[in-house]
Image (spheres, rainbow, N blue to C red):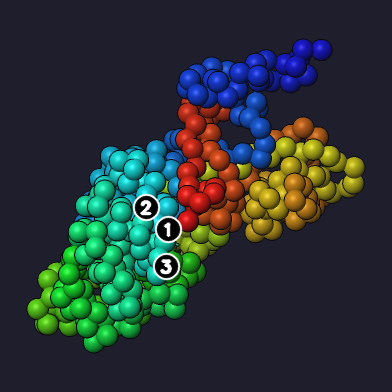
Amino acid sequence: MAAGAAFANSKTFPYQEFEQRIAKKDFRDMTKEVLPTPCMVVDLDLFEKNLKTMADYAKSAPIQLRPHVKVHKSVDIAKRQVALGAIGITSATIAESELMSRGGIKGVLWTKQPASYNNIVRAIALSKADPTFMFVVDDASVLAKVEEAAVAAKVNCRLVVSVFAGLTRQGIANGQPAVDLAKRVMSTKNVSFEGWMAYSGGASHTKGWEARRKKSVEDLSGVNETVALAKKAGLPNGIVSGGSTGTYNMDHELGLTELECGSYVFMDSLYRAVGGKSDDKVYTDFENSLSIITTVDSKHHAGQATIDYGNKALLQPTDQVKGMPWMKLEKQGAEYGILRWTDGGGETKVGDRVEIYCSNLDMSTNCYDRYYIARGNQIVDVWPIMGRAGAAQR
Ligand SMILES: Cc1ncc(COP(=O)(O)O)c(C=O)c1O
């Protein structure tokens, strides 16, 4: 039997040509059915809508947008964000910063300070190669090491002081300690002071829009005191960068000059549950534009089936099954997951494709190599997910 004959709804696709076709960007007859699973698929219409919603909002607020790329790790996506008005991108690791900068993205802001020899050397090299690159410091000892390396390399580094905004993982204490560090930056050789980074990560997933706004106000109050004190002390005005997808439509009123939102491009099931301004239960401002396609591989027991989406593909019981809210996911093992359902909802059968909304975007995208870009059922492009493997990852 010809391969295509068993799949009445799909054409016979020459799978042996799959990679060559992708390399040539020849997507003829490449539909979702022929993709290997589990794989990540982006609904292009919904994705473009998300990008436009955020870009339009930033313009109208007005506030600058420097979107976080840890969620997508894709130069293709960063370029689209810049084309819609973003002033650069925000990154979590030096490797992400290098990849984005080498991919042609200007205005990269790296939000972790370089505390190790490896990170300092790379931050200096990137500052040399790309004078628009900025990175944070929240500690005078790191600043001293950066100065030494920058002077030796005859490079200027653009520094942003990371201040506490409710998240204990980083940020110098607000008020005098923060201002003193900024003054120290000003008097350090081969560096310039560019402003403040204040990521209020605790606010981003606070449930309910009003509660989220209250948390964001609390988290940013110390930051605003610092900025006022710095002004009084004669420090130059600079950027105040922070915010998230959860707080994008409040932060322009709370002292930030730019937003570092990341998840809005795709959204995940945990973010959708935080509730929005218009709907307290579901955060509908942005659409679920990313799903993971899986295949039902086995089914022999009532009320359950096995899919090829397991621990290695980052199955989480909080993931959601697209279009089938009665289905629940359970971990089974490295390569398998269990779909479980209660009577009345509807079943799946062997060979079915089931689409999953992941719970935690940046964790999941880090497990996949590429996004298959789809308009409806048709694949129209493939974008690599970069910087995941080997030394370049960090
Ligand atoms: C420093 C920083 N800024 C911004 C963000 C983006 O947040 P979100 O994905 O919630 O929009 C993150 C995400 O973890 C972050 O670590």
Precedes in sequence: disc 3 or disc 2:
2
Q: Is residue 335 visible?
A: yes
- Nearest the eye: 304 or 306: 306
Q: Which mark is residue 97?
A: 2
Q: Amino acid at mark 2?
A: Ser
Residue at 90 percent across and 46 percent down: it is: 301
Report whether 337 appears left or right of 43: right
Precedes in sequence: disc 3 or disc 1:
1
Q: Where in the figure is residue 125, as x and y percent of width and height? A: 30, 54
Look at the numbered disc 2 and give the secondary structure of its residue: helix
Residue at 42 percent across and 61 percent down: it is: 118
Residue at the spot of label 1: 93
Report whether 68 appears left or right of 350: left
Residue at 65 percent across and 16 percent down: it is: 14
Residue at the spot of label 3: 116
- Nearest the eye: 179 or 99: 99
How far apart in space, not on screen, are marks 3 and 2 (Cα)? Answer: 16 Å
How far apart in space, not on screen, are marks 3 and 1 (Cα)? Answer: 12 Å
Q: Where in the figure is residue 77, as x and y percent of width and height? A: 39, 41
* Quadrant where the N terminus is found in the figure: top right
Report whether 102 appears left or right of 24: left
Look at the numbered disc 3 and give the secondary structure of its residue: loop
Q: Nearer the viewer, mark 3 or mark 1?
A: 3
Q: Nearer the viewer, mark 3 or mark 2?
A: 3
The answer to whether the beta carbon of the residue marked 1 is less than 8 Å from any atom of ligand 1 is: no
Q: Which mark is residue 387?
A: none
Look at the numbered disc 1 and give the secondary structure of its residue: loop
How far apart in space, not on screen, are marks 2 and 1 (Cα)? Answer: 6 Å
Q: Amino acid at mark 1?
A: Thr
- Cβ–Cβ below 8 Å for labels 2 and 1? yes
Q: Residue furthest bottom?
A: 176
